[in-house]
Structure formats: structure tokens, C-alpha cells
Image (tube, helix red, strand yellow):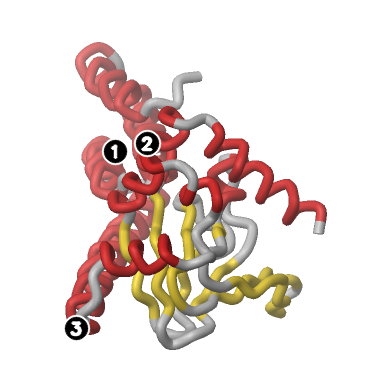
Amino acid sequence: EPEDPTHYVKLGDFYQKTHNDEAPARAFQKAAELYRAEGALAKAVCAYKKVQQIKPYDITIQKKLTECMLELKESQFAEKTVHCKVEKRGVTKEELIRELMESDCLPPLFKENPELRDMLYEAKLVDAEEGQVLIKEGDRSRSVFIILRGTVKIFITIGGKDMDIAKLGPGDIFGEMAFITGNPRSATVVSSSPDLMALELEQPLLEKMVDKEPVVLKYLYDIYKARKSD
């Protein structure tokens, strides 16, 4: 079964001309779910709206559309907040990356490969306050993070109680498990210091890195395997 959401959008458009309401609704809903899993929330909202036009009284679709719209608004707000914090603090992403490169904290994979180092400048700079959630258990995001400053705490929730499993600092990488396995996030990661700054390598950038240097995938897999065995 194709996993490209645009395939189902085109299929839905075709079905609207040749089938009853059920077939195009299924196709558009599949597209919306795939877009949402990829984090392409704006496209997911558009696809859910197409389903809603076909099934205006479907409560399940209305609920999913509302949830997706809220996620989109939250992500847009988070991006604006991060940008404002960085400007206010007066530090640039470039300065922080250079600082990391000059330290002993930069993962060897990047330190020894100029092309990969240059790609780090394409990553997002995340500036988080203490207690701010960077990754939530169960989410379907695929980003991998490299800590520049500060620390994070990683925990899982069992029976309604949080259980700490790790604490990471400058130079450490987290989030690799979801990228490697394609599964939802297996733990929650929160900032445990007031000055956390990290690079967020989103899925398209990671795939670009892997295409350029396949050893990146092995490096992330080795981290994943080591943590899984702990």
C-alpha cells in the first residue's frame, strides 16, 4: 500500500468524479493521516476538510480535524516563540555551532566530516526553558536533537507515574529511536536547565545527511542499539 499522501489526494480527486462519497472520503482521510504522521499539519488540515465536505456530520472526522488544527496552531506558536527567545538572548545559531565545534562535545561523526558539519547550519535552533517539553511520549515526530548548552531529562510514564531513565548534556544526541524505527516516541524529553539550547535535525535534513553520508544512519543506529541494551 503506498505511503505517499499525495497519491491518496489524487485518488480522492479521481474518485469524486467516478465513485460515491465513501471512496473519496476514505482516500482523503488516508492522505490526512499520512500527512499528520509526517508532521505536515497544514496539508493534513486541508485533507481533513475535504473529508468534512463529503461527510459534514461525521463526528470522528470533525474531532480529528479540530485536533489537527490545534496541533498546527501550537507548532506555529512554538516556532515564533523560539525565534523571539533567540533574538532576545542575543546569540545566533552560527555562534553556538562554532562554539560546539571548538569544544570536545561535538559528536566525532560531525567533527571529522566538513560536509556534515556544514549541514548542521541547516538545522533549527531550539531555545527551551526549564520544564519545556521537547519530545512527548507517543508523538510521531522524527526529529533528532543535538544539545548545545544545558541538559535534558528523559522519562517514561508507567501506570500514571513518571520514571526517569536518563539525563543528557552538551554534545549528546537524542530522538534517534523514532527516526531509526519509524515508531512513535518511546519517552518524553524535557529541558532540565534554564538555558537549554539544541539543534533540531528534522527528518528531511536527516535524510539528506544519510544520502550524503550513509554512515550517519549507522551512527544513529549504534546510539539506538546501545541505549536499547541499557
Residue, disc 1: 51
Left or right: residue 97 versus residue 185 is: left
Q: Could you tell me if the residues under marks 2 and 1 are in contact, i.e. CB atoms within 8 Å?
A: yes
Q: Earlier in the sequence, mark 3 or mark 1?
A: 1
Q: Earlier in the sequence, mark 2 or mark 1?
A: 2
Left or right: residue 188 versus residue 142 is: right
Which mark is drawn over residue 29? 2
User: Can the viewer see residue 141?
Assistant: no
Say which element carries label 1: helix
Q: Quadrant of the C terminus?
A: bottom right
Q: Could you tell me if the residues under marks 3 and 2 are in contact, i.e. CB atoms within 8 Å?
A: no
Dot 2 alpha-carbon crowd within 10 angstroms: few under 14, some 14 to 19, many 20 or more: many
Say which element carries label 3: helix
Q: What residue is rendered at 44% in x and 75% in y?
A: 149
Which quarter of the picture shows residue 215?
top right
> Given the image, on which type of amino acid does mark 2 rest?
Gln
